[in-house]
Image (cartoon, rainbow, N blue to C red):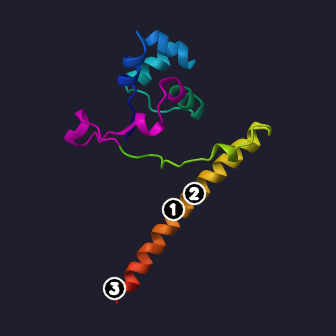
Amino acid sequence: MLKLDVKKYVDEQFDNLNQFAKATGLNYQAAQKIYNGETTRITFDNLESICKTLNVTPNDIFIFDDSNKESKQNPTKIPIFHSVKVKPESIHTNESSNVALYRLIQEIVDSSLNDKLRNIDIKIQNKSDDK
């Protein structure tokens, strides 16, 4: 099961949970559930706000917690998102935000696909070299 683990980041950057709630724009109860790892859903807007406030990526705060195993006390971090470098010059700030966002997403997808295709090509070449 995926869970949010923000406690260490919040404790490092804020004196109390109320400051974290105000900084992210969340109500106190929602911030408290997120802080305690009790939340079961989160909107992209709230996730974005938390990541910006804590200066982290979703990959930093998502953990995999398998409740059926003893690893419950030591949840394992898993990579949720693949890091992609985006050239700042490819994002045009004079365009509407929807178009800029579309271009950014398109660049991320293209980059990920190129990486995957390169890996497939390497595997195919290695198999043909074995013969």
In the displayed image of the protein, which residue is found farthest to the bottom? 131
Q: Which residue is mark 3?
A: 130
| Spatial separation of the CA atoms under disc 3 and disc 2 | 29 Å
* Residue under pointer 2: 111
Q: Which comes sooner in the sequence, label 3 or label 1? A: 1
Task: Give the quarter of the image for residue 96.
Answer: top right
Q: Residue 7: image x %, image y %?
A: 37, 23
Q: Are marks 3 and 1 in contact (CB under 8 Å)?
A: no
Q: Residues within 10 Å of mark 1 (few under 14, many from 20)?
A: few
Quadrant of the image containing the N terminus: top left
Looking at the picture, which amino acid does disc 3 mark?
Asp
Q: Name above or below for residue 99 compared with residue 19.
A: below
Residue 50 in percent (x, y) is at 51, 26
Q: Position of residue 9 (x, y in %)?
A: 39, 24
Stretch of the chain drawn in magenta: 51-77
Quadrant location of the C terminus in the rendered image: bottom left
Residue 27 visible from this viewpoint = no
124 relative to 83, above or below: below
